[in-house]
Image: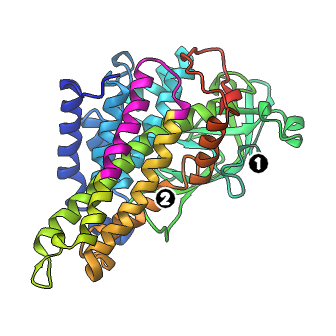
């Protein structure tokens, strides 16, 4: 296992860092304050080959690996979580799933334009009354002839009001729905242009205010049968595969947020003086800086391990869960301490640390709450989950026995 990044990785890191400096940092304070989403960011990300970063070149992507994806997420969230979220849902949750689970027709029609940035994609699993409880979903898909009729509502969906394509999870076996049997769930590729699709945005969020988050309503939406991803009954396994990709990007992004907190505090600690000396000379401030530095280092090592496993084709469910759990936990701590280091100034938006603190909270909820990951890690430690590394073997699906 080698965690040293190569020249290609360094190029992606530099590209993403420059992107954040040029297109995120100059306007993020204003956009966050106004809860304003900037739709021009998609074209900029597409031009930089970020939206298809680790999709093979044959499908219009840049052909990079998982370590490159992690580095990009780190740098983008260093700028702001709202832009990293775009990469997480468009590439991590949607496009990588199409790459692994889609057929040739679906890859040509949907994956290629998404990798090129011509179409924006997202992921629709959560509902008003179902998040971690996936089998609590109420959305249904009833087959009629060569189409499925979808009805239901999705909630807390990133890019809901701006995406062109959605991965939607719904029950295709209503008898299994009554029994809460997850083998009755299926996944569909749904286009915004299909009749019966309505979306809207959610305002008043604690964090990620410059990002678009919303809801999707489906009323008798006719979806061609050819848009079924995989087979009927594979929805739960596909959803878990999607989330594993998303968790990886969140872990790397949260690591970038820790670094943003640390850098802001280091700068402030050298210039702000109390008791006639820089606050960085006070022991308890040093303690907070040391904790941020340590949190950054081991969070980074955890997502790098997961990325290395992925590059080898090894299923990385345990390492990804651990990386996501720890990095998000450390990001919350770093955000809180960053506000503390800045004192009263940290309590205002004059400095970016209050935004970092607010943004850090969301990551402990989406892509598996901290409680879900705590239980997962306990089950691995107790031997209640299969901890044997397995090589990805697609198809057959699903991997529902270990998610």
Camera-side residue of 233 and 167: 233
**Label 1 or label 2, whichever comes before in sequence order:** 1
Side of 98 where 20 appears, left or right:
left
x and y, in percent, of residue 36 in the image: 37, 64
Contact? badges 1 and 2 (CB < 8 Å):
no
Mark 2, other Cα within 10 Å: few <14 / some 14–19 / many ≥20 = some
Give the magenta-colored segment's residue range: 294-318
Q: Using the image, tell me which numbered label, if any, was put on residue 136.
A: 1
Disc 2, SS: helix
Asked if residue 224 shows in the view, the reply is: no
Camera-side residue of 37 and 62: 62
Q: Is residue 302 magenta?
A: yes
Q: Main secondary structure of the magenta part?
A: helix
Camera-side residue of 119 and 256: 256
Instruction: Give the quarter of the image for residue 200.
Output: bottom right
Instruction: Give the quarter of the image for residue 344.
Output: bottom left
| Image height of 289 relative to 11, above or below | below
Residue at position x 34%, y 41% from top?
300
Disc 1, SS: helix
């Amino acid at each position: 296992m080698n965690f040293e990044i190569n020249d290609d990785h360094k190029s992606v890191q530099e590209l993403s860092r420059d992107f954040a400096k040029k297109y995120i940092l100059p306007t993020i304070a204003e956009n966050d304050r106004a809860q304003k989403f900037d739709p021009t960011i998609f074209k900029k990300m597409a031009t930089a080959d970020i939206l298809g970063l680790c999709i093979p070149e044959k499908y219009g992507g840049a052909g990079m690996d998982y370590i490159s994806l992690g580095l990009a997420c780190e740098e983008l969230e260093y700028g702001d979580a709202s832009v990293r979220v775009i990469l997480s849902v468009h590439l991590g949750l949607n496009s990588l799933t199409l790459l692994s689970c889609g057929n040739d027709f679906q890859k040509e029609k949907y994956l290629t334009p998404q990798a090129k940035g011509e179409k924006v994609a997202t992921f629709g699993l959560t509902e008003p009354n179902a998040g971690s409880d996936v089998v609590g979903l109420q959305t249904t898909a009833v087959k009629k002839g060569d189409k499925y009729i979808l009805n239901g509502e999705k909630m807390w969906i990133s890019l809901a009001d701006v995406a062109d394509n959605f991965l939607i999870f719904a029950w295709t076996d209503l008898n299994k729905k009554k029994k809460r049997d997850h083998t009755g769930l299926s996944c569909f590729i749904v286009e915004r242009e299909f009749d019966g699709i309505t979306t809207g945005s959610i305002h008043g969020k604690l964090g990620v205010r410059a990002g678009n988050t919303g809801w999707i309503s489906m009323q008798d939406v006719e979806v061609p049968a050819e848009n079924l991803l995989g087979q009927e009954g594979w929805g739960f396994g596909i959803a878990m595969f999607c989330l594993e990709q998303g968790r990886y990007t969140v872990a790397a992004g949260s690591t970038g947020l820790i670094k943003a907190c640390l850098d802001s505090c280091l700068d402030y600690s050298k210039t702000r003086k109390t008791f006639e000396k820089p606050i960085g000379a006070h022991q308890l401030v040093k303690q907070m800086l040391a904790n941020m530095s340590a949190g950054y280092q081991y969070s980074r090592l955890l997502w790098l391990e997961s990325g290395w496993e992925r590059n080898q084709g090894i299923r990385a469910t345990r390492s990804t869960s651990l990386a996501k759990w720890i990095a998000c936990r450390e990001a919350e701590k770093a955000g809180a301490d960053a506000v503390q280091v800045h004192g009263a100034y940290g309590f205002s938006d004059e400095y970016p640390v209050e935004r970092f603190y607010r943004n850090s909270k969301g990551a402990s909820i989406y892509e598996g709450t901290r409680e879900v990951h705590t239980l997962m890690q306990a089950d691995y430690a107790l031997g209640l989950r299969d901890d044997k590394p397995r090589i990805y073997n697609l198809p057959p699906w699903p991997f529902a026995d270990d998610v």
